[in-house]
Image (tube, helix red, strand yellow):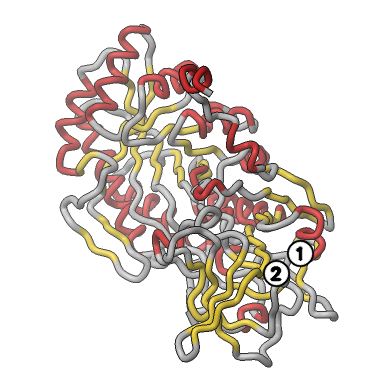
């Protein structure tokens, strides 16, 4: 990765945070110190230690407001943006998105419970997943949470449970629309290889089966075409495809009232990234559905979308402390930090790229030092950056990595028995803990020695 600090000089778009690399409150003051949310990052790590996750509340709220505003502007019918909580699940995040009028998408009992504890109304929660357990399904039903049917196993269990409870259950179905989207290209096929959803070619059979059940009421459709999407054309196609499926369902007596087009809007991780704005994405989705409904003389369904990354990623940064240096002459210089793949598994898993700088000298371009930034874990592949350009730095300095609000915390682990970092919320000069730092002793809480081993000792 060859990255300089020019991204710190970019104009900040406060209305579509996904088009920024940095949180919208990022400031470099006259002394060349970096602050977010009115808080100097060096002060945060001095108080809360490192590694440290930091979330900017204003960036989060601006992202939510951008989705709400665009839906009100472009979609004349009812709408509901739903936060994809897998991006970053916590009681705080659930509470914040609920306060902004969002619903929430969950894929486990843990995410469902977190949403409810955070104050998300149960009628605004949808339950996804390709292998829901009976316990999870029963939890959703008992809490009157809408279930999205992913496969035949789901359908069978929902039918049996609703029959046993003599309870009418509203459901949505997820299908693969034949659009496979990547960051810079997309293809359309009859069906594609995915563990999620019914193939579009099986929908008529599915509609017939559901029409013969006693308690299942099909009211909605769901489709999702990818992640970190930079194109708009695939969503033009998606709206038309989904409206055509509404017409198919109607032939079997199903009244589809809700249309969930998924999420996947990309964000700007690197200087060369150029995602659409939230406004542009919502406009494309909305107009495609409106035009297709008008063409087919259908009433507008409730339009749902499921942003996750584009809500929380840009709002988050991670701060690391620099430790050891290792120079291999003519090859590279390793710079090691006090975190790595346990708090950010995306580089080793997806070869993901990020932007970063020193927090005490972010704009120093006098030095052309390039470092391979390595994590502290016992894996050769635990590398966060290759050839990251930094100013002069030493052991004890701190690096800020941008765009880490999504999937870092939620995918973190305790590999090598390393505790998970704390998460701090910053806003208007105030900093508050929203997730406590784990300690090594916390990692022993669920370890149990068998009785016979205790007796032997």
Mark 1 crowd level (few <14, some 14–19, many ≥20, 10 Å Cα): many
Q: Residues within 10 Å of mark 2 (few under 14, many from 20)?
A: many
Q: Residue at x 31, y 20 (%)?
A: 158
- Taking the image as drawn, is residue 282 in sight? no
Q: Secondary structure at mark 2?
A: strand
Image location (x, y in percent) of residue 217: 33, 22
Q: Which residue is mark 1?
A: 41
Q: Nearer the viewer, residue 327 or 261?
A: 327
Q: Position of residue 293 (x, y in %)?
A: 34, 46
**Lateral position of residue 110 relative to residue 351, left or right:** right
Q: Nearer the viewer, residue 415 or 299?
A: 415
- In the image, taking residue 259 as reference, residue 111 lies left or right, namely right
Inter-mark Cα distance, 2 to 1: 9 Å
User: Residue 411: x and y, percent?
Assistant: 49, 48
Residue 63 can be seen in this image: yes
Residue on which the image places disc 2: 398
Pick the front one: 363 or 341: 341
Q: Residue at x 51, y 64 (%)?
A: 267
Q: Residue furthest front?
A: 456
**Vertical side of 324 occupied by 450: above or below:** above
Figure disc tally: 2
Residue 137 relative to residue 356: left or right: left
Disc on the earlier residue, 2 or 1: 1
Left or right of 262? Residue 403 is: right
Evaluate if marks 2 and 1 touch, with contact meaning CB atoms under 8 Å apart: yes
Q: Residue at x 65, y 75 (%)?
A: 357
Q: Which of 347 and 60 lies nearest the eye of the viewer?
A: 347
Q: Quadrant of residue 403?
A: bottom right
- The residue drawn where x is 21% and y is 51% is 193
């Amino acid at each position: 990765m060859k990255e300089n600090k020019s991204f710190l000089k970019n104009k900040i778009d406060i209305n579509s945070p996904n088009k920024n690399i940095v949180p919208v409150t990022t400031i470099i003051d006259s002394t060349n110190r970096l602050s977010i949310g009115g808080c100097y990052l060096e002060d945060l790590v001095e108080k809360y230690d490192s590694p440290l996750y930091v979330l900017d509340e204003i960036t989060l709220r601006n992202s939510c407001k951008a989705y709400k505003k665009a839906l009100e502007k472009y979609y004349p019918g009812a709408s509901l943006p739903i936060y994809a909580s897998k991006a970053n699940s916590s009681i705080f995040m659930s509470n914040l998105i609920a306060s902004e009028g969002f619903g929430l998408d969950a894929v486990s009992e843990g995410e469902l419970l977190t949403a409810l504890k955070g104050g998300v109304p149960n009628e605004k929660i949808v339950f996804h997943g390709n292998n829901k357990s009976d316990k999870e399904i029963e939890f959703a039903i008992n809490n009157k949470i809408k279930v999205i049917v992913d496969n035949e196993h789901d359908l069978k269990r929902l039918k049996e449970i609703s029959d046993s409870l003599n309870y009418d259950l509203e459901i949505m179905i997820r299908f693969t629309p034949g659009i496979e989207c990547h960051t810079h290209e997309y293809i359309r096929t009859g069906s594609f290889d995915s563990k999620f959803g019914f193939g579009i070619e099986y929908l008529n059979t599915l509609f017939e089966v559901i029409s013969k059940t006693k308690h299942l009421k099909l009211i909605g459709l769901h489709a999702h075409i990818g992640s970190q999407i930079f194109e708009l054309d695939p969503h033009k196609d998606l709206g038309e495809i989904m409206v055509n499926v509404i017409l198919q369902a109607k032939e079997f007596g199903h009244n589809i009232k809700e249309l969930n087009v998924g999420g996947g809007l990309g964000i700007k991780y690197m200087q060369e990234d150029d995602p659409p704005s939230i406004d542009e994405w919502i406009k494309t989705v909305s107009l495609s559905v409106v035009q297709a409904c008008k063409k087919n003389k259908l009433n507008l369904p409730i339009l749902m979308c499921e942003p996750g990354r584009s809500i929380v990623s840009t709002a988050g940064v991670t701060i690391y402390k620099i430790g050891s240096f290792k120079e291999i002459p003519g090859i590279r210089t390793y710079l090691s930090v006090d975190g790595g793949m346990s708090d950010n598994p995306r580089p080793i898993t997806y070869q993901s790229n990020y932007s970063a700088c020193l927090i005490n000298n972010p704009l120093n371009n006098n030095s052309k030092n390039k470092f391979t930034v390595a994590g502290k874990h016992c894996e050769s592949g635990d590398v966060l950056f290759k050839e990251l350009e930094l100013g002069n730095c030493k052991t004890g300095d701190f690096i800020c990595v941008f765009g880490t609000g999504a999937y870092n915390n939620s995918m973190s682990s305790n590999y090598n028995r390393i505790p998970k970092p704390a998460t701090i919320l910053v806003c208007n000069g105030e900093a508050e803990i929203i997730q406590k730092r784990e300690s090594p002793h916390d990692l022993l809480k669920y370890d149990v020695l068998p009785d016979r081993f205790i007796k032997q000792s």
